[in-house]
Image (spheres, coloured by chain):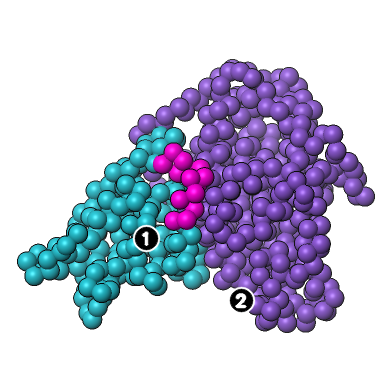
Chain colours: A cyan, B purple
Amino acid sequence: MALNRDTDGLLSEVTQFIYREARFQDGHAYDDWEALWTDDGVYWIPANGDHSDPERDMSIVYDNRSRIALRIRQLHTGKRHAQAPRSRLRRVVSNVEVLDEGGDEIRAISNALVFESNLRGDIVWASRNEYLLRRVNGELRMARKTVHLVNNDKALYSMSFLI
Amino acid sequence: MFPFVGLGDDMSAQAAAIPDINELIRPEHVHGSVYTSEALYQAELEKIWYRTWVYVGHTSEVPNANDYVLKSIGPQPVIMTRDRNDQIHLLLNRCTHRGNQVCVFDKGNSRTFTCPYHGWTFSNTGQLRGYPFPSGYEGTDREELGLGRVARVAEYKGFIFGSFAEQGPSLEEHLGGAREAIDRLVRNSPEGEVEITAGFLKHKARANWKFLLENETDGYHPQFVHASIFSVAQSGIGDLYSSDSTAVARYLGNGHSENDLRPEFRRLDKPLGWFGTSAARMPEYVAAMNAAYGENKAREIMIDGTPHTMIFPNLFIAEIQIFVLQPLAVNETVQHVTALQFKGAPEMNRRLRQQTMGSVGPAGFLLADDSEMYERNQRGIQVRDPEWVFLGRGKNRERRDEDGFMVGDATDEVPSRGMWQHYRTIMEER
């Protein structure tokens, strides 16, 4: 998708990037989603509140780039039972803000509500998402995405889709 | 999460009398209702969870005087405290005045718990220290108004268990054949201790707790449930549970069981092979182990690795992590899971956490699929015909080992058969 920075501005470019990511996730477009990452990307979903340290504490997901790739390869096997059949997903992403911009890097946040329907039933996930975006060959890429689930301190059902 | 609709989630909760357990458990079959009966679940709470020894927490979760952490025994919340004299207490989270919760924080450090409702204050040993405006309680015996407590508390090598029964077998008697698993685990630390310091992931499944319990030492499922990750990651786990594996499934008595993978690890004869790494890649750990145990013994420990043992009813030592099972309802169970940390082995500990985070919890490469199976099992078991689950795998080749324990091949259902006979025995007790 062509983006015009000059007319839409940085916020619009970032927002469009986040919308596109959401569309890839809802549509299980795994490879398209994986291509959004930089080579050193880190995908982090902390547990147990707002102050956990992934290098000390358990996280729901703490994937470096090769583990992100492994996650995608597992989904592609068709035998990831928790995603066979795939969850039906639709998410709303909002409250996008650019917090910081310096050099090639942009720090942005958004809120997300994800409706998931699967064999167990229907469920809503809510999160604040933090992005560290980097411009690579003119295109925005995710260098870090942190998903702060509102209820990450509680017992959660399986969450085997890309959030 | 907000379950708007519980699709296909028939509680089938007959609030009828407790079914006759003898009718439901046969040598190679159990009746499907053992996973769905509300009456049976209520009986299990009384006869298993609120009577026998249940794992609660680890001493390293309350390392300092006056530390506390919220734990549970089944649906009952329990405050595990360490008092100023280093004594561990398991207190019940209910004010003795009018039943309010006295503690709502997951963990902390405090000598006292003050009920927010009327200001009653309890020490971390459970005694009632005082209440506001005491003139209204003239003649009241404060001694009798201490917090409820788990009647018996016992520790084995850092692992704290509780029993609501005033009397009964000792913890060591209860652990029996599974005690050795804890010995085998802790010696993988050069200091002979494991620590639980990384916090727990809490992973919920809409399934009866016994589906989880049985799956922990089911050596038949990995190649199928975990086919997706085994096919894309370098993992030797699949081979350990093949029909060619020399590993054994063992029933340890008292409901406990294990998949003993040591025969395979010894055949491969590679220190730290059990952990998917090598001595060359963990030089500091190997040096510390050699210094602690001597080279020969250290080599033996590093070949054998850690156990894969289910301690009935709720502690699963799964090589690199522990799971603590917590039933919340007949069809709802939480798995609390965290990485084991080996004291004195920082080089190992990051890898233990990283592998655990990849494998388990709501998004884990392994556990999301296990949990998917638990939930499908819970739905499937409610189908009317056939009424029975068949657990006969390996009956033809089960045998007693030199210690007298029943063993089968790696993929055999010896652990489930043993667990159900134990279950029948304790459920029949008055």
Identity of the residue drawn at 64% across and 20% down: B387
Q: Is residue B419 visible?
A: no
Query: Residue B287 magenta-drawn?
Result: no
Where residue B18 sits in the image (x, y, percent)? 65, 21
| Magenta region, residue range | A72-86
- Frontmost of labels 2 and 1 is 1
Q: Which residue is mark 1?
A: A34
Give the answer, above or below, for where B274 lies relative to B259: below
| Left-right relation of A103 to A64 | left
Identity of the residue drawn at 80% across and 37% down: B394
Disc 2 residue type (three-letter): Pro
- Classed neighbour count for the residue bearing mark 1: other residues with Cα under 10 Å, few (<14), some (14–19), many (≥20): some
Q: Is residue B350 visible?
A: yes
Q: Which residue is mark 2?
A: B346
Identity of the residue drawn at 59% across and 54% down: B230
Mark 2: secondary structure = helix
- Classed neighbour count for the residue bearing mark 2: other residues with Cα under 10 Å, few (<14), some (14–19), many (≥20): few
- Which of the two residues, A50 or A24, is positioned nearer the viewer here? A24
Mark 1: secondary structure = helix
